[in-house]
Amino acid sequence: MMRYTVGSESMKPNDGWRPTRLEEALGPAAGRFFGAGYRTVKHKLEGERKDPDVFEGVGHVSYPEDWSVREDGTRRTPHLSTIDAVTLPLQAISRTWHRPPGEFVSAIHLRAGSQPWLDLETVPVVIQPTAAPEGAAFSRSFTASVGNIKARLCFSVHSSSTVDANPCQPGATNIYEELYRGTDCATTLTSFDSSSGDLEAAHEFTRPAEAQRTPVGLECEFWPSMTVVDYLVTMGQIVQVLMAERQGADREAGQLWMRTMSIQLPNSPAPLPASITSRTAPTHERLIEREGRRIQLIATDSSTSTGVRVAAQLAHVEER
């Protein structure tokens, strides 16, 4: 079943509260993009570095038919996603610019276009480095446009002497091209406050089967470890639960769109397996009607026990 059940007795914030598995709230991971669908999306990136120090290329994104399925078995139309807008630039940056050892993703900021990008066979990708402000916590940053999604990606360097400066072997796999897909997570919703909207959860991330493979490129020194994708898909599902509980947003009756998203990762990637906790709360909520459709707007703030912060603005658009 692919139906929200967060209004059930198990989710009610009272003395009878019991921990609830994420799948009880959202349905099985299969058929949900943030649950499992993102793992099956294929990317191909073509392009090159041009003067003055700009990468220009084209991404080809292939979604399987069952990337996101309604309860009645019908399939949603695929569109460029947050994960595509993160992984394509990370692949290009890792291939194109020299990378200092011990570097990791420390922040990403995304702003979506006004309409979904549907031409997945031809996704323009343009990236260029930007100067880091004086006193910035990161070592370098890039601006990117992926289809109609604008991004800024920031990187920091782990200064610990325990990081091996040259652990990578030629011909191995890039984490943000392939290996990030292998990490699984079991999430339990542990607490919900109906007045504030605070939703707390515990997450168990497993060591992927590909952990023994030696990667190259960005964050290879830390592998096997959590990636920015792990946080985005996990917090994305938590926000879906929160919207259903707060606003009655039904996955079967609409589509969830990211408007803006910022993630801060102040520490180097946590090693796998990992047990972490999170807290997510709404910071703004609004219901509007446009062209006969109900649009539920929500802004959320999430934090984790690993120090990661995710702020997002989302819209749940009722399907006709």
Image (cartoon, rainbow, N blue to C red):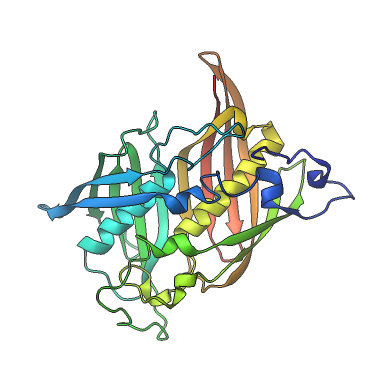
Residue 130 left/right relative to 236 = left
Residue 21 is situated, as x and y percent measured from the top left of the image, at 71, 54
Kindly give the residue lying farthest to the top in the view shown: 292
Residue 73 position (above or below residue 59): above
User: What residue sits 34% from the left and 42% below the top?
Assistant: 150
Residue closest to the eye, 118 or 288: 118
Instruction: Determine which quarter of the picture holds residue 99.
Output: bottom left
Instruction: Determine which quarter of the picture holds residue 166.
Output: bottom left
User: What residue sits 35% from the left and 34% below the top?
Assistant: 117
Residue 129 is situated, as x and y percent measured from the top left of the image, at 24, 55
User: What residue sits 42% from the left and 42% below the top?
Assistant: 81
Kindly give the residue lying farthest to the right in the view shown: 15
Would residue 227 be visible to someone looking at this image? no
Instruction: Determine which quarter of the picture holds residue 177.
Output: bottom left
Residue closest to the eye, 37 or 269: 37
Residue 101 left/right relative to 64 = left
Residue 206 is situated, as x and y percent measured from the top left of the image, at 57, 68
Residue closest to the eye, 132 or 152: 152
Quadrant in the picture for the C terminus:
top right
Residue 65 left/right relative to 118 = right
Residue 173 position (above or below residue 49): below
Kindly give the residue lying farthest to the left in the view shown: 51
Quadrant in the picture for the N terminus:
top right
Q: How many marks?
A: 0
Residue 223 is situated, as x and y percent measured from the top left of the image, at 43, 74
Kindly give the residue lying farthest to the bottom in the view shown: 161
Residue 210 left/right relative to 193 = left
Residue 2 position (above or below residue 157): above
User: What residue sits 63% from the left and 48% below the top?
Assistant: 28
